[in-house]
C-alpha cells in the first residue's frame, strides 16, 4: 500500500507509525508542518512559519494550507490517508477538499479539552469530524467522548508497546535496600506530578525506614515549580530528576522501579501509554481514576486505582504495596501477560493494517 500520514513528523507516535508500516514494505509519506526526517519515509514539509510553537489560536493558520495538502496528496496518489490529531492536522485536512476518503486519528486533548474552550473550538472539532470519512480512537472511552460531537463510529486502535524494549530483563538493580517509586511523564499540570510529590512526602515522613527513592523522568512547563515543591516538602534529597530520556532508558527506568506511578488528573489522557510500558516491564502500577488509564491496565490485578488528586490515598497505596512484596510480584507478572495479550506493538499495528486494507478495497 501507499500510505500518507498527515501529522507532525517530529512526534514520537508519528515516527513509530511511519516506521512500522515502512518496515512492512509499504510506501509511506508524511505531510508535516514541522521539518523532520524519518528513515525510509518521504516527509513533505509545508512551511507555516513559527506558528507550530505558538498557542492554539495561532495554529488556526494551519487551516489556510489545505490547498498545499491537496496538491501533495494529488501528486502522491495514496491508497490510505490518515490525519493525526483532529483539531490541528485533522482540521487542516478537512479544508483540503481532497476527493480521497481519509481517516482522522483522535489523540486525546483534541477531543477532551479543545472543544470545551469556546464555541469556535467546538465548531472546529465538529467540522473536522464531519468532513472525515473514518475515525480512529486509541481507546473506547475516547470514542465515547467523540460521540458527543459526531454520529460516526470509531475504530479502536490503541498504541502498542514493543515488548522486547519494555521488558523485565532490563532490571539491573542489585539488592541495594532501596524502595524505588517513579514515573516517566511530561512535567505538566495535567499529569499530577505535584500529587505524586505530596504523596511521597507523606510516605517519607511516616516511614523513614523505607529507604525511599523517587525517580521522575520528563521535561515540561512545570519543571521549575515541581522542583521547588520538592524542596518545600523537604524531599528533594530523595528525588532524582532525570529530564527527557530515550525509549530505551525509559524501559530501564520502569524495569528498575518497585512501583510505577501514573497520577494524572485530566481525562484528556485518553490512553495510558506509560502505564502499558510499566506493566510490560513487569512492574505494578498505581493509577488515578482516569478512564483511559483504567482501560490500559487491569485494575485490581495489574494496577491499583486511586481518586485523582487524592495524595493521601495514593500514599496509602504506596505503603500497601511496600508491605506486600508478594502482591507486587503477582501484579507485575499479571501486568506483563495483560500487555502481551492486549497491547503488543505488532499485534496493534497489524489490526490497523487490516483496517487499512479493508478501507482501501471499499
Image (tube, rainbow, N blue to C red):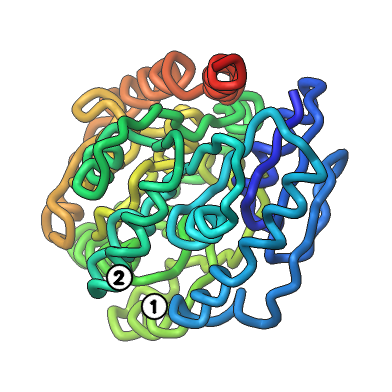
Which residue is outermost to the right?
A: 40
Front residue of 187 and 137: 137
The percent coordinates of residue 270 (x first, y second) are 34, 46
Residue 217 in the figure: left or right of residue 360: left
Residue under the image location 41 percent in, 53 percent down: 128
Distance of label 2 from label 1 (alpha carbons): 6 Å
Front residue of 349 and 124: 124
Which quadrant holds residue 109?
bottom left
> As displayed, is residue 283 above or below residue 241?
above
Residue under the image location 39 percent in, 78 percent down: 226
Front residue of 240 and 107: 107
| Sequence-earlier tag: 2 or 1 | 2
Residue 326 in the figure: left or right of residue 347: left
Q: Is any atom of residue 309 visible in this view? A: yes
Which quadrant holds residue 123?
bottom left
Residue 128 in the figure: left or right of residue 286: right
Residue under the image location 70 percent in, 81 percent down: 49
The residue tagged with tag 2: helix, strand or loop? helix
The percent coordinates of residue 345 (x first, y second) are 58, 25
Q: Contact (CB < 8 A) between labels 2 and 1? A: yes
The quadrant of the picture occupied by the N terminus is: top right
The residue tagged with tag 1: helix, strand or loop? helix
The percent coordinates of residue 160 (x first, y second) are 52, 30
Residue, disc 1 = 226
Residue under the image location 65 percent in, 25 percent down: 164
Residue, disc 2 = 194
Residue 83 in the figure: left or right of residue 33: left
The quadrant of the picture occupied by the C terminus is: top right
Q: Is any atom of residue 172 visible in this view? A: no
The crowd level at tag 1 (other Cα within 10 Å; few <14, some 14-19, many 20+) is: some
Amino acid at each position: 500500500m501507499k500510505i500518507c500520514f498527515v501529522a507532525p513528523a517530529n512526534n514520537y507516535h508519528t515516527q513509530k507509525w511511519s516506521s512500522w508500516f515502512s518496515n512492512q514494505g509499504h510506501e509511506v509519506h508524511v505531510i508535516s508542518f514541522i521539518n523532520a526526517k524519518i528513515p525510509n519515509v518521504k516527509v513533505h514539509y509545508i512551511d507555516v512559519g513559527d506558528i507550530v510553537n505558538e498557542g492554539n489560536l495561532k495554529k488556526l493558520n494551519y487551516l489556510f494550507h489545505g490547498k498545499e495538502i491537496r496538491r501533495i496528496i494529488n501528486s502522491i496518489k495514496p491508497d490510505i490517508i490518515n490525519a493525526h490529531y483532529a483539531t490541528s492536522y485533522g482540521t487542516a485536512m478537512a479544508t483540503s477538499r481532497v476527493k480521497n476518503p481519509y481517516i482522522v486519528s483522535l489523540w486525546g486533548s483534541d477531543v477532551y479539552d479543545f472543544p470545551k474552550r469556546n464555541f469556535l473550538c467546538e465548531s472546529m472539532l465538529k467540522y473536522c469530524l464531519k468532513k472525515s470519512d473514518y475515525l480512529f480512537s486509541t481507546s473506547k472511552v475516547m470514542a465515547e467522548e467523540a460521540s458527543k460531537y459526531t454520529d460516526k463510529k470509531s475504530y479502536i486502535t490503541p498504541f502498542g508497546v514493543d515488548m522486547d524494549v519494555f521488558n523485565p530483563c532490563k532490571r539491573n538493580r542489585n539488592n541495594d535496600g532501596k524502595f524505588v517509586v517513579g514515573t516517566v511523564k511530561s512535567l505538566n499540570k495535567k499529569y499530577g506530578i505535584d500529587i505524586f510529590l505530596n504523596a511521597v512526602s507523606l510516605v517519607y515522613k511516616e516511614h523513614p525506614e523505607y529507604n525511599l527513592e523517587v525517580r521522575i523522568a520528563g521535561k515540561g512547563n512545570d519543571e521549575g515549580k515541581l522542583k521547588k515543591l520538592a524542596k518545600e516538602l523537604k524531599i528533594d534529597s530523595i528525588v532524582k530528576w532525570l529530564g527527557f530520556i530515550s525509549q530505551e532508558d525509559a524501559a530501564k527506568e520502569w524495569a528498575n522501579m518497585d512501583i510505577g506511578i501514573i497520577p494524572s488528573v485530566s481525562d484528556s489522557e485518553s490512553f495510558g501509554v506509560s502505564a502499558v510500558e510499566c506493566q510490560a516491564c513487569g512492574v505494578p502500577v498505581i493509577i488515578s481514576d482516569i478512564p483511559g488509564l483504567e482501560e490500559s491496565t487491569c485494575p485490581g490485578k495489574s494496577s491499583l486505582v486511586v481518586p485523582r488528586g487524592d495524595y493521601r490515598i495514593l500514599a496509602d497505596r504506596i505503603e500497601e504495596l511496600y508491605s506486600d512484596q508478594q502482591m507486587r510480584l503477582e501484579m507485575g507478572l499479571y501486568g506483563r501477560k495483560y500487555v502481551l495479550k492486549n497491547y503488543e506493538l505488532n499485534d496493534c499495528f497489524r489490526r490497523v493494517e487490516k483496517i487499512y486494507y479493508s478501507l482501501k478495497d471499499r
